[in-house]
Image (cartoon, coloured by chain):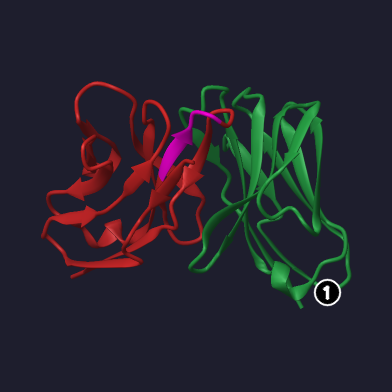
């Protein structure tokens, strides 16, 4: 069965420091992986996706994610965090056996302190 | 205009009342979804529709119903609202390949 785990409910980082938001997955077949961000009082916004190709995927707002097949991980990263990056982040995997629907992780709240 | 529009943005209703949340999309996609978000529980799928004639229950459909009026419109109803349905509700749409969902801004529903 497809599943996504975000092991950290919250990640705290100081502004200017690098950040990592962790995601591991389980899927049948090729993994199609996504990151979404939710700012307060807003809907989820697409950040980036991995379908195939380079293991390092670059997305919006300076974020990138590293696909690691052996560790079944897709961690979200940014070299230098901004206070405005504070938000809720969701990892998702496409369910290749259920109509290509996405399965979402539980979300990780990122807090960037000045 | 937003790709996915949800109305209302906020709603307070009383226990036992019927309420409808509406969603429309301009992406031209066949697939639409309704999710519920509670603090600490992430997104939970209520109903989904792969086309106008195809509607399916998600993991938490009890107490909810939906109507797919057209390719672009997918509404969610609470037939008799109860306080534990207080939550943030999101509508989304996607193409058939599932390579990206577009979400609405959400409806914050409070049942008192």
Taking depth in this image into account, of B89 and B60 the one nearest to the observer is B60
Camera-nearest residue between A22 and A24: A24
Q: Residue at x 59, y 28 (%)?
A: A99
Quadrant of residue B2 within the rendered picture: top right
Residue at 24% x, 62% y: name it: A83
Colour for chain B in the figure: green
Chain under label 1?
A: B
Q: Residue at x 41, y 36 (%)?
A: A27
Q: Which residues are magenta?
A: A92-97
Comparing A32 with A83, the one in front is: A32
Horizontal and vertical percent for residue B80? 87, 65
When asked about the image quadrant of residue B69, the answer is top right
Q: State whether residue B5 is above or below residue B61.
A: above
Image quadrant where one finds the N terminus of chain B: top right
Judge from the rendering whether residue B105 lies leftward or rightward of residue B23; answer left or right.
left
Residue under numbered circle 1: B14
Q: Quadrant of the C terminus of chain B?
A: bottom right
In the picture, measured across the screen, residue A99 lies left or right of residue B46, that is left
* Image location (x, y in percent) of residue A79: 12, 49
Locate residue B72 relative to residue A68 in the image: left or right: right
Q: Tell me residue A32's x, y (percent).
A: 38, 30
Residue A30 in percent (x, y) is at 37, 26
Magenta stretch encompasses residue A26: no
Per the rendering, the colour in which chain A appears is: red
Q: Main secondary structure of the magenta part?
A: strand
Query: Badge 1: how crowded within 10 Å, few (<14), some, or many (20+)?
Result: some
- Which secondary structure, mark 1? loop
Q: Describe residue A30's horizontal placement relative to residue A94 as left or right.
A: left
Against A114, residue A24 (above or below) is above
């Amino acid at each position: 069965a497809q599943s996504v785990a975000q092991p950290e409910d919250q990640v705290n980082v100081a502004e200017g420091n690098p950040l990592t938001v962790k995601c591991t997955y389980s899927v049948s077949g090729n993994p199609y992986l996504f990151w979404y961000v939710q700012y307060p009082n807003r809907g989820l916004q697409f950040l980036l996706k991995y379908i195939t190709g380079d293991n390092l995927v670059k997305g919006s707002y300076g974020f990138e994610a590293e696909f690691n097949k052996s560790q079944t991980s897709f961690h979200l990263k940014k070299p230098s965090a901004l206070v405005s990056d504070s938000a809720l982040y969701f990892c998702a995997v496409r369910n290749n056996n259920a109509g290509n629907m996405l399965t979402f992780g539980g979300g990780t709240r990122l807090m960037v302190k000045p | 205009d937003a790709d996915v529009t949800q109305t209302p943005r906020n709603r307070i209703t009383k226990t036992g009342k019927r309420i409808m949340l509406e969603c429309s999309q301009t992406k031209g996609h066949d697939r639409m979804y309704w999710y519920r978000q509670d603090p600490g529980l992430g997104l939970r799928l209520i109903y989904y529709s792969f086309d106008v004639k195809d509607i399916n229950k998600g993991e938490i459909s009890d107490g909810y119903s939906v109507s797919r009026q057209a390719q672009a419109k997918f509404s969610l109803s609470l037939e008799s609202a109860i306080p534990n349905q207080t939550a943030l509700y999101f509508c989304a749409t996607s193409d058939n390949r599932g390579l990206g969902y577009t979400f609405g801004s959400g409806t914050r529903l409070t049942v008192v």
